[in-house]
Image (cartoon, coloured by chain):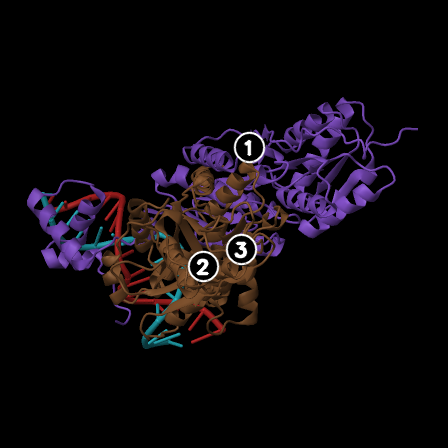
Chain colours: A purple, B brown, C cyan, D red
DNA sequence: ATGAAAGCGCTAACAT
DNA sequence: ATGTTAGCGCTTTCAT
């Protein structure tokens, strides 16, 4: 019952009366082995419950560990979970295993995780950078040929491959959608201003306004880092002298809060478009129109980029932009309500 | 730019003019080193970008790999993601890293992942079993002292530690809640019958009925494996000669489908209680009453159990049941509507 | 077709 | 305070 030594190749070899090398040949299908010897070795392996020690193998072969290190802000966030899943299923055929950790959006935990992963000699490193992190310390790794990839947000202080959503264009299309339905006073509710994704989406919002010749009003831009903050923001926006008729919620947390705030106010007449799809979006009343990201595709794109690097592709750093898609369900198609339309001059 | 050899302890030692062992002493804070030597070693380490090779260390120390292998059905599912996150933050202080893979609910992928993890010599193994898997093959590992833990569902063919939600009692309380509000015809909509969690929750449903002296009617038990199936189930249940007045949705997918189905029918008068909380639950109209699980607590409980085992606890297999909590928000408190109440005999 | 020796990077157990 | 030797489990290289 106590921790017993696992069978090694040498154990198996001794059982059969051969050398470890011969067992190794059987295990790796490498070099000739007499059919009968192979039989006996396989039998002994089964009997002893032998499993080759991957650590030892990787070490001797001088190969890196057959893992890919992944640093994400939060494992409970289905967006990152789905990205990770898409990545994992794309690389598993190659014998790569995923090793993950949460940075909790802090630069310090991010660094400590990266450092653990490097110590493990991961085959490649994927990072979703936290807001205040700096990646210059990875330059040496990059120079040494370690495939490095940044996800959802670009690296800072370092040029490297990255995969991101089409944040700007996605946001632009979502806002343009509401403009096309007659809205001119459209609020932007999003995460903290230092976040890359928020900045990009805010740009997209401004792009859409500019295209339509609508002036940018900074009082319509609110921070809604969590549900309650976003709900409060909506209340403020609707209580203003010249209230908005539509809201663009730049991430799922903001969208949830906006919907919540509107529900509390009993307002069903506001147009809303969210960024990032929500499982219950179609159940809401009105059903929520969103700019959907494709997290599984992001994971797959990351896998492809990385595998190309592992296959020796030496081209310069690439950024893959994964398209978003507007899913219209009702909330974005509401026309400006009479009640909310400014009384005019 | 090509894959360059990483600096080793010997490289550092040579730089400084000492032996690898001395460098090792500095790195591991193990044994005395002259202050000045230490300085020079640290300097050289920095200059060469030395990072100790964890694989080599683990191997020499005869320790297992400092990782915990985790097999979950789906990384994109926030429930499992949050469990994993809770576990990870609890074990990180111990220097353990999480290595994960998705089984996609298939026994075959589950086995292949387990096998990869064993080959890596993980320190412990955590598995969320897929419906048709068999864990007898892990008996030898267990006997050899590998800490083994089953999550969310028990192992099959093997006695081992496990952590589960209080599925039965949680479901009982959710259904009892609706009974307390006057409902007697309550439907059960859940996942496929072979799933452990569904079976337990169905038992809880029956417990609640029995307590209230309400007969069990198998025609009120429906399968809603995905949203659409659950929505269709609701339509059937309401179209019956003697329609239900309340629905217990035994998992989040069923709950989403039930809410969706009711919305399509325009029925706001049905009591609904879901199992497992949903991010938008409070935004629904009426807001969704749920039996909430506590995935982070499940992860922490798993970490504690496992760490106790690593510390040598040899007691027999334990099952930790993590409590659920009824969150009342409105949908479970609706009284049976006149329209839906059976006309009586 | 099989084996012997050496070594991957590190550390345990002894020296000195 | 530092060094030597040996070996973790495996594979490479070269013999036989």
Specify whether disc 1 shares its chain with disc 2: no
B27 vs A15, left or right, is: right
Residue at 45%, 33% in the rendered image? A304
Q: Quadrant of the C terminus of chain A?
A: top right
Q: Is the C-beta separation of discs 1 and 2 under 8 Å? A: no
Specify whether disc 1 shares its chain with disc 3: no
Q: Is residue B20 visible in this depiction of the protein?
A: no
Q: Nearer the viewer, mark 1 or mark 3?
A: 3
Distance of mark 1 from mark 2, alpha carbons?
52 Å
Q: Residues within 10 Å of mark 2 (few under 14, many from 20)?
A: many
- Indicate the position of residue A255 as horizontal and vertical percent values: 65, 42
- Residue that label 2 marks: B171
**Which chain does the numbered disc 2 sit on?**
B
Q: Residues within 10 Å of mark 3 (few under 14, many from 20)?
A: many
Q: Quadrant of the N terminus of chain A?
A: bottom left
Q: Is the C-beta separation of discs 1 and 3 under 8 Å? A: no
* Between A138 and B268, the one nearer to me in the picture: B268
Quadrant in which residue A268 is drawn: top right
A341 vs B167, left or right, is: right
* Between B260 and A61, the one nearer to me in the picture: B260
Distance of mark 3 from mark 2, alpha carbons?
10 Å
Label 1 residue SS? loop
- Residue that label 1 marks: A317
Question: So how many labels did they put on this image?
Answer: 3
**Which chain does the numbered disc 1 sit on?**
A
Q: Is residue B228 visible in this depiction of the protein?
A: yes
- Residue that label 3 marks: B290
């Amino acid at each position: 019952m106590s921790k017993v030594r696992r069978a090694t190749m040498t154990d198996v070899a001794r059982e059969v009366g051969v050398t470890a090398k011969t067992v190794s040949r059987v295990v790796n299908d490498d070099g000739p082995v007499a059919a009968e010897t192979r039989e006996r070795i396989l039998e002994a392996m089964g009997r002893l419950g032998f499993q080759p020690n991957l650590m030892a193998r990787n070490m001797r072969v001088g190969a890196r560990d057959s893992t890919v290190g992944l640093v994400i802000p939060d494992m409970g966030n289905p967006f990152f979970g789905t990205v990770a899943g898409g990545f994992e299923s794309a690389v598993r055929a190659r014998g790569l295993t995923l090793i993950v950790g949460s940075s909790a959006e802090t630069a310090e935990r991010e660094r400590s995780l990266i450092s653990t992963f490097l110590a493990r000699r991961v085959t490649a490193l994927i990072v979703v950078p936290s807001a205040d992190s700096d990646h210059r310390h990875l330059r040496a790794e990059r120079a040494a040929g370690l495939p490095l990839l940044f996800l959802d947000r670009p690296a800072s202080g370092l040029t490297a491959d990255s995969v991101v959503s089409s944040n700007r264009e996605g946001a632009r299309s979502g806002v343009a959608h509401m403009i096309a339905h007659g809205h001119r006073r459209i609020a932007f509710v999003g995460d903290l201003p230092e976040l890359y994704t928020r900045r990009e989406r805010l740009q997209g919002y401004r792009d859409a306004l500019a295209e339509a010749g609508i002036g940018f009003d900074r009082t319509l831009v609110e921070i809604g880092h969590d549900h309650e903050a976003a709900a409060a923001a909506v209340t403020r926006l609707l209580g203003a002298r010249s209230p908005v008729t539509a809201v663009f919620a730049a991430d799922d947390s903001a969208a949830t809060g906006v919907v919540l705030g509107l529900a509390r106010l009993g307002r069903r007449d506001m147009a809303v478009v969210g960024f990032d799809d929500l499982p219950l979006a179609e159940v809401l009343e009105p059903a929520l129109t969103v700019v959907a990201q494709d997290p599984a595709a992001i994971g797959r794109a990351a896998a492809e980029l990385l595998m190309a690097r592992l296959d020796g592709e030496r081209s310069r750093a690439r950024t893959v932009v994964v398209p978003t898609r507007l899913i219209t369900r009702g909330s974005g198609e509401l026309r400006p309500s009479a009640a909310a339309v400014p009384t005019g001059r």
